Image (cartoon, helix red, strand yellow):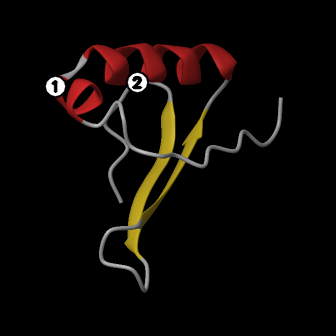
Amino acid sequence: MVTAEPGCLRFEVVATGDPLVWRVEEAFVDAAALAAHRARVAASLWGRVTAGMARDLRVVGG
């Protein structure tokens, strides 16, 4: 499990039964850390390349 990003408590990527679908679970210390993460990802090569991919996002907690 990798948690190198500031404010990240947990980061886990798990394969599913579909080779094109992965489950990503992340936990952040607060909403500000999550917002910073989302901004960083959106500006990254990964964010740009995967911008059109479907995502099922759920934010739990407050």
Q: Secondary structure at mark 1?
A: helix
Task: Please indicate whether residue 8 sits to the left or right of residue 48 in the image.
Answer: right
Q: Secondary structure at mark 2?
A: loop
Kindly identify which numbered label has been placed on residue 6: 2
Task: Please indicate whether residue 56 sits to the left or right of residue 58 in the image.
Answer: left
Q: Quadrant of the C terminus?
A: top right
| Relative vertical location of residue 60 with respect to residue 6 in this rendering, above or below | below
Mark toward the viewer: 2 or 1: 1
Between residues 2 and 53, which one lies in front from this camera angle? 53
Q: Position of residue 17 (x, y in %)?
A: 43, 86
Task: Please indicate whether residue 32 sits to the left or right of residue 3 in the image.
Answer: right
Q: Quadrant of the N terminus?
A: bottom left
Q: Which amino acid, mark 1? A: Leu
Q: Position of residue 19 (x, y in %)?
A: 30, 77
Q: Residues within 10 Å of mark 2 (few under 14, many from 20)?
A: few
First in sequence: mark 2 vs mark 1: 2
Q: Position of residue 11 (x, y in %)?
A: 43, 51
Q: Quadrant of residue 5?
A: top left
Task: Please indicate whether residue 25 sits to the left or right of residue 50 in the image.
Answer: right
Q: Which amino acid, mark 2? A: Pro
Between residues 30 and 51, which one lies in front from this camera angle? 51
Residue depicted at x 24% and y 24%: 48
Distance from the alpha carbon under mark 2 to that under mark 1: 19 Å
Between residues 18 and 16, which one lies in front from this camera angle? 18
Q: Which residue is mark 1?
A: 45
